[in-house]
Image: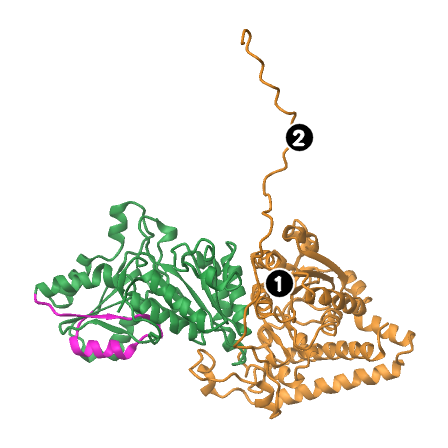
Amino acid sequence: MPELAYRDALKEALDEEMGRDPRVYLMGEEVARYNGAYKVSQGLLEKYGSARVVDAPISELGFAGLGIGSAMVGLRPVIEMMTWNFAILAMDQIVNNAAKIRHMSGGQLRCPIVFRGPGGAGGRLSSQHSQALEANYAHFPGLKVVAPATPADAKGLLKSAIRDENPVVFIEGELLYGLKGEVPEGEHLVPIGKADVKLAGSDVTIITWSRMLTSCVLPAAQALAEKGVSAEVLDLRSIKPLDLEAIAASVKKTNRVVIVEEGWGFAGVGAQIADFIQRECFDDLDAPVLRVHGLDVNMAYAANLERAIQPSTERVIEAVNQVLYK
Amino acid sequence: MHSSELLLTLFRKMSLSRRFEEKAGQAYGQKKIQGFCHLYIGQEAVVVGVNEALRPDDYVMTGYRDHVHPLVRGADAGMLMAELFGKDTGYSKGKGGSMHLIDVEHHFYGGYGIVGGQIPLAAGMAFASKYRGEDRITVCSFGDAAANQGALWESFNMASKWKLPVLYIVENNKYGMGTDIARVSGEPDIHKRMGAFKMRGETVDGMDVLAVHDKVESLAKDLRAGSGPILLEAYCYRFRGHSMSDAATYRTKDEVEARKQQDPIITLRTHLVKQKVATDAELDALDEAQKHIVEEAIAFADASAEPPIEDVYTHALIAEGEPDEHPRARVRGVEVKWPTYPTDFKVTWDLEPKEAPVSIAPPVEEVAPAAKPMKKKGAA
């Protein structure tokens, strides 16, 4: 299996889907001549032409809405947001139109569209450029929200998102674009709504998604293994729909849970998962569910503060020891 | 120059629109319609004049003052009223209500409640037409106040640059809810702003249905020929408040009365009688027939059931293989011709044709050529 960087896995998905379906086009800032701010669309303009790889003006709300309108009448747009921080400007269109048109038309219209781009911290970018916003989008009925952590999942989930009949918020990890991993060639589809056990274990379940998997959860699991603690690592991949079955199955097995989330704790995705676990898996729990998340403060620029604000391997290990009463 | 058939259609549809809205207003008073309810009374010349100049397969959308836009496109009056009543037989099974009427069968795509939120969508629908090489146009209406939304500026910029076949219509009724457009706008005449986008900005008397019709007929021709987007500002007036809960105290009685003298339906009636297209009695009969349609619509909505409670979660997310709802087929049991969108085609549109780079440098004043350097004294 070839090894690809996360960005190239995404490009492979785009390329394959554009190749098989003329309705698919890519629009966003710098996606065409510049080949993408993160080089995800490298070479696609040359291959597919200026109507299918479109450089948009800096008008996030405008081109998000344009994409939605085109999806309502039969196209399948992929709208690239240079970062999800900028997409806050487009939130009205995503939330008030894309997420609601199926419902308010009583099933007459559909909106198959993908909004994709990097989320989370990018490294020394301060507060306006470092937000993990998946909880915001997951809040709204009518949207799917996915956040792949590996190159293989990036490709497989993007292909599924493009073929999905619903609007999909596709959040890539800003610091993951260079991450390499094995990626199946050709028709590799990862179903939306299915979590993946990235590491099997028996003592504790660590639930996470996106960059936290490789930045602190797997390193923590490895360190814990050296101390004789067997951690099961569950990568959600999809935030919405959430794979409740996989979560319940793992909790049943380990009886202890730590949820690791890059975003803020208050009303975060982890709060939703903890709510589910205490309701549905109460009798399986041997300890309260603990959460490791971004500190509830805006991101700082200074290197030490930025480190302190984000979840770390140390904080994950500490939380695991706590649920094990060690 | 206008056929009798067209003139009578214009009259019939304006009358139907007026009667529909009058009854909707009454039903609101009876609490059969609740929530927000924005009536179109007074502005009928715009929606009818525009519609009769379009093709049935052109894409049409508007904001939340949307009851009569689908009606004049051919939607079922009873099912529209049922939607306003929140009934299962409504176009959206009671999920949308007054502000979100949608009838895809007649290419009416909504019905949007966030001011100006439909403007980018219209650019996208026109983008899709151009992408597939179709000659249909998209027509998107909004009120004067929506012109101050960023959504408009962002969309017009793209529509202009990419020459999208979209006709934007400002239904300028002078007030954004209770605020006179001139009180909050540096340039209250919206069409005058179009120079900023290199877009055509046109105007029309929105109280004159023939003027609206003729204008849109000519603009639609230009749009199909590749003119790029056009804005048409139709100056009109709503005789009622912004919504049913608005007593409209921000306007004087004199102002409203003066405008009512320009009632577009009376104006057309006078014209038809004068031109001997129809007699007053014939027009009365036509009007009565529209009243009857609306009475039947009310009866239908009244007699319809609320949506089943099991439907509370339907149409949230689309399951694999889930078909679209075809409202008239579902409710009336008739066969409908549902719009289809091609899945296999070749994209030939060059969105960014090679052109001479446009200079963005400020104009430079002519300066005298630099003086020749003086020869150094004593140089050879």
The residue stretch that appears in magenta: A228-257
Q: Position of residue A63 (x, y in %)?
A: 52, 61
Q: Position of residue B227 (x, y in %)?
A: 68, 61
Seen in the picture, residue B271 relative to A121 is either above or below; the reply is below
Chain A colour in the picture: green
* Residue B366: assigned label: 2
The type of residue carrying mark 1 is Leu
Q: Chain of mark 2?
A: B
Q: Are marks 1 and 2 on the same chain?
A: yes
Chain for colour orange: B
Please indicate, yes or no, whether residue B304 appears anywhere in the rendered image. Answer: no
Q: Secondary structure at mark 2?
A: loop
* Residue A271: assigned label: none
Residue at 19% x, 58% y is A313
Specify whether A126 is left or right of B142: left
Seen in the picture, residue A127 relative to A88 is either above or below; the reply is above
Q: Position of residue B74 (x, y in %)?
A: 68, 81
Residue A251 among magenta residues: yes
Quarter occupied by residue B337: bottom right
Mark 1 Cα-neighbour bin, 10 Å: few <14, some 14–19, many ≥20: many
Q: Earlier in the sequence, mark 1 or mark 2?
A: 1
Residue at 42% x, 82% y is B320
Question: Disc 1 designates what residue?
Answer: B164
